[in-house]
Image (cartoon, helix red, strand yellow):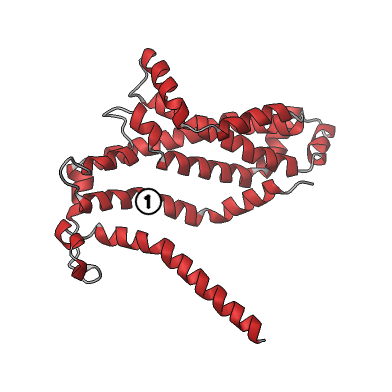
Amino acid sequence: MRPRTGYRVFRATALTLVVLGLIAPLVWMVAASFKTNVDIYDPSKAVVFSPTGDNYETVLQQANYIKFIVNSLWVAFASTALSLVLGVPAAYSMARFGMRRSALVVLMARVIPGVSLLVPWYYVFSNLRMVGGFAVLILSHMFVALPLIVYIMMGYFEGLPQELEESGLVDGLTPIGAFRRITLPLSTPGIATAGILSFIFSWNNFMFALVLSGANTKTLPVAIFDFVGYASIDWGGLMAASTIVTVPIMLVALFAQKYVVSGLTAGATKG
């Protein structure tokens, strides 16, 4: 019993340290967003301080971050929705017809670093006069979201019994009708998983938006850099803006974690 008790104590201690290590930066960020710049630099006010909402007022009113929030939501929703519309049928076709080579191409597109494509993208889209618009941001985000959705949904479709579709065909359904009425409803957890992960990527993306966005299409991760100046940094405003970026997506991941886990688990099993 003693070795087992010692293992439990060790495991609880290790988990506590890991959780504290992960949560501590987030707690400091949220706390700093309610401090003045002077209090942030003062070690004596690391825990006890007089909270202020001026940083959030600066972010939401003076810096007009409501516009950047709307931009991020629009790009994330549009890229995710279009990727699902294209990726789910593509994944179904690859899974049902054994298109392994096509799946390998999709996987290679997932592996290619996005930074290696920024210069060609900028050259092509600038010649098309699309740089600075929402369309180029949505397309660039789809380049990563679409292979991710296809890769997740392929494993999910391969785990669904094909006999269900065959029974639908016997009852008079067409192949498309069997997919729409039988397979698609059963694949809801996988679609939710792929959509959530795609949305999180798009919401957090900085690199593509930094190069391809304009003044009116700037997203939140890029807009945060407005608080970083040449001679000084507005740490209070920076932490408030970072909290606005981080907290919503953390809440989405927290409440949707059961769908993500069930979707990934179902997609990892076959038969």
Residue 220 at x, y = what percent? 32, 40
Above or below, 263 against 118 in this view is: below
Q: Residue furthest top?
A: 127
Residue 248 at x, y = what percent? 39, 51
Image quadrant of residue 96? top right
Residue 111 at x, y = what percent? 56, 35
Q: Residue at x 64, y 28 (%)?
A: 105
Image quadrant of residue 29? bottom left
Q: Can the viewer see residue 56?
A: no
Q: Residue furthest bottom?
A: 2
Question: Is residue 61 toward the left or the right of residue 95 in the image?
Answer: left
Q: Residue furthest right?
A: 170
Q: Residue at x 81, y 32 (%)?
A: 169
Image quadrant of residue 124? top left
Question: Is residue 176 toward the left or the right of residue 225 in the image?
Answer: right
Residue 232 at x, y = what percent? 16, 46
Question: Is residue 38 toward the left or the right of residue 67 in the image?
Answer: left
Mark 1, residue position: 246
Above or below, 48 against 182 in this view is: below
Q: Residue at x 57, y 56 (%)?
A: 258
Hey, what amino acid is under mark 1? Thr
Secondary element under disc 1, as helix, strand or loop, is helix
Q: Residue at x 73, y 30 (%)?
A: 100
Q: Please state, as top left, top right, bottom left or bottom right, where the N terminus lies in the image.
A: bottom right
Number of numbered discs overlaid on the protein picture: 1
Q: Residues within 10 Å of mark 1 (few under 14, many from 20)?
A: some
Viewer-closest of 46 and 170: 46
Above or below, 66 against 36 in this view is: above
Q: Can the viewer see residue 130?
A: yes
Viewer-closest of 163 and 46: 46
